[in-house]
Amino acid sequence: MGTAAEVVVYGATGHTGRFIVAELRRRGFTPVVSGRNADRLKALAAEWGDVEVRPAGVDDADALDRALAGAAAVINCAGPFAVTGGPVVEAALRAGIPYVDVAAEIEANAAMFADHAEAARRSGTAVVPAMAFYGGLGDLLVTAAMGGRTAADSVDVAYGLSSWRPTAGTREAGRVSHDRRAGRRVRFADGALRYHDDKAAQAEWIFPEPWGRRTVVTEFTMADVVTVPSHVDVPTVRTHMSVEAAGDLAGEDTPAPEAVDALGRSDQTFVVDVLIRAGGAVRRATAHGQDIYAVTAPLAVEAVARILTGRTRTTGVASAGAMFDAADFLRALAPYVTVELPA
């Protein structure tokens, strides 16, 4: 299938959605913008000039079906995914087209695997949740670093962010997740998601240079605790966050991202550092880049491109590491992401 294929971007007017529309256009796809706010969609279409608009609310199955009609795939960027994920993936399955989302919400991702795996498997449709900075990138790094191994004793993913200016969508998704958990924290231990009231702790993490030794909030749990165990036999997955970023996210007055370059990226830089322990050995993989929201666009669009050209390893609901050749996928992210993998 050629890259002129139509790809529906649901939630196209959001911060990440705009990056994805731009990346689709850069890659030669034909983006179709959809979402709940018709006026904002029309304003976006006027900005781009040649983008088709198909408004649809998640509570209107017929409208969703019309939005996806004739499309080759759909990318869902509209949070909270606890609200949008189910209706949009169900519409994709009815249409028989691949579904990719950029959800960072732990419970929404877990629900995607639990609630839609059988229908996606029966239809032979590819469904890839968390195909984003959180959940997708870490899972690809873990998979590539394991080099074909399918089991580990533990996986740690440390996020070093120079800052974190959250979007309105990030804040809303965080509120939904907080309410669903009744304020409790979550971890993946003993092979399952577990909820607890422990206070957050801090530790030192030695990132590759130039980051070096930094303080992180330990078990600052992100979507990797869903994506990695979905295909790796591992009892413990932990994710950690640099204290600077955690503080920014917690701050009620932290401003939204501001563009500093022609691509619309902020000045935020990141490093994702993965440590895998298995049988007494330690394997490490690292990724560096700029702007966690902007880098989600090449991740999601590369996923769609690979699905549509048959470069996949399975069908049904699968994480990035299970669906794709992880090392090859990571190399394809250049120049947006610089990756260091074990030999």
Image (spheres, rainbow, N blue to C red):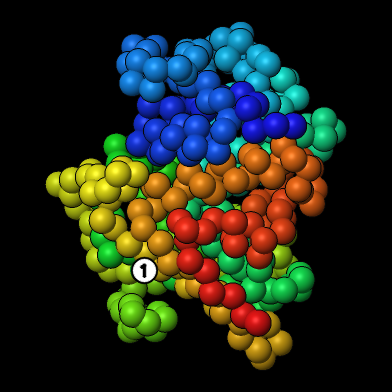
Q: Quarter of the image holding residue 48?
A: top left
Question: In the image shown, does 336 or 60 lie closer to the viewer?
Answer: 336
Which residue type does callout 1 highlight?
Answer: Gly
Identify the residue at image location x=61%, y=10%. Answer: 66
How many numbered marks, from 0 up?
Answer: 1
Q: For this view, does 140 lie left or right of residue 133?
A: right
Q: For this view, does 61 lie left or right of residue 255?
A: right
Q: Residue furthest toward the right?
A: 122
Q: Give the residue pinned by disc 1.
A: 160
Image quarter hosting the N terminus? top right
Identify the residue at image location x=62%, y=18%. Answer: 68
Q: Residues within 10 Å of mark 1 (few under 14, many from 20)?
A: many
Examine the rendered structure and indicate whether residue 203 appears above or below residue 57.
below
Identify the residue at image location x=53%, y=25%. Answer: 31
Q: Position of residue 145 (x, y in %)?
A: 64, 73
Question: In the image shown, does 110 or 75 lie closer to the viewer?
Answer: 75
Question: In the image shown, does 1 or 105 lie closer to the viewer?
Answer: 1
Q: Residue furthest toward the left?
A: 253
Image quarter hosting the C terminus? bottom right
Q: Is residue 293 visible?
A: yes
Q: Is residue 257 visible?
A: no
Q: Position of residue 242 (x, y in %)?
A: 32, 69
Q: For this view, does 182 lie left or right of residue 245?
A: right
Q: For this view, does 323 lie left or right of residue 154?
A: right
Q: Quarter of the image holding residue 290?
A: bottom left
Q: Position of residue 295 (x, y in %)?
A: 44, 51
Identify the residue at image location x=72%, y=51%. Answer: 323
